[in-house]
Image: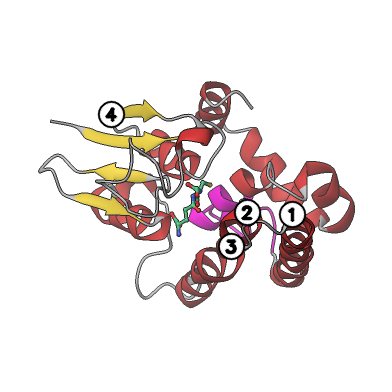
Amino acid sequence: MTYKLYASPGCGSMLVEAAFAKAAMPLEIVDIDWEETGWGSEALKTLNPLGQVPVLVLPDGAVMTESAAILMHLTEIAPHADLAPPPGDPSRPHFLRWLQFLVGAVYPTFTYGDRPERWLPGHESAGEALTHANIEHRKSLYRHMEAHAAAPYFLGAPMSLIDIYLWAMNHWRPRREWFARETPKLHAIAEAMRREAWIASVAQRNGL
Ligand SMILES: N[C@@H](CCC(=O)N[C@@H](CS)C(=O)NCC(=O)O)C(=O)O
């Protein structure tokens, strides 16, 4: 048995796919169309009632959801991949802070903004406003991160899971051109990630 990732091309499953690629660990990937994700997802509902990817099934059959939990598990089983500063490292508190910020503050803006009809059924214009409000809020969160970003990676060096998130999220709304214009440090991090061969192979498989 190997690790099995339920993924959707271009989505948050890329975070896990990229971390496995950096760790050079085998991964079986089951791709699910974006339209097949969500609360009604036949493919996902027994594994994750939220119908979200990523879902990782471990070799012993245990199911993990929540990208940060999965990725932190990976830091434990694949320490050679250098995905996070180790406990005791001076940058560890910053790492923990911004990892939690990404999944606790930034990621939910997609949950509430991407499928507004779920939250406001029958209110099309209110739904559009909800999407817009979430994108605007997300921009302010990225600006906050920009003010704390180091170089060449978010924590300085070496790279960490934070940079994998910044690379993946650079493709999503408000999208690459906005980052280049408004948050040049975050954009430079995503560009540095794109130059990594293991990221390039994940990007290619995801059709980016
Ligand atoms: N808290 C979750 C969020 C995952 C998530 O929102 N995934 C998106 C794809 S990027 C998804 O599957 N969305 C479908 C939906 O929420 O209906 C995590 O960190 O893994």
N-terminal-most mark, 4 or 3: 4
- Provide the residue designation for mark 3: 119
Give the camera-side residue of 35 and 164: 35
Q: Position of residue 109 (x, y in %)?
A: 63, 63
Q: Mark 2, residues whose alpha carbon is within 10 Å: few (<14), some, or many (≥20)? A: some
| CB atoms of marks 3 and 1 within 8 Å | no
Range of residues picked out in magenta: 150-166
Pick whichever of labels 3 and 1 is earlier in the sequence: 3
Q: Nearer the viewer, mark 2 or mark 4?
A: 2
Give the labeled residue for mark 4: 26
Work out whether mark 1 precedes mark 4 in sequence or the reverse, and give the earlier one: 4
For the residues bearing labels 1 and 2, Cβ distance under 8 angstroms = yes
Label 4 neighbour load within 10 Å: few <14, some 14-19, many 20+: few
Which residue position holds label 2? 117
Q: How is the image coloured?
A: secondary structure
Checking the image for residue 132, the label placed there is none
Name above or below for residue 194 compared with residue 167: above
Q: Quadrant of residue 143?
A: bottom right
Give the Cα separation between the discs numbered 1 and 4.
44 Å
Q: Which quadrant holds residue 191?
A: top right
Mark 1 → mark 2, Cα distance in angstroms: 7 Å
Q: Quadrant for residue 32, please give it.
A: top left
Kind of residue indicated by mark 2: Glu
Relative horizontal placement of residue 150, taking residue 202 as reference (left or right): right
Which residue is under mark 1? 124
Which amino acid, mark 3? Trp
Amino acid tagged 1:
Glu
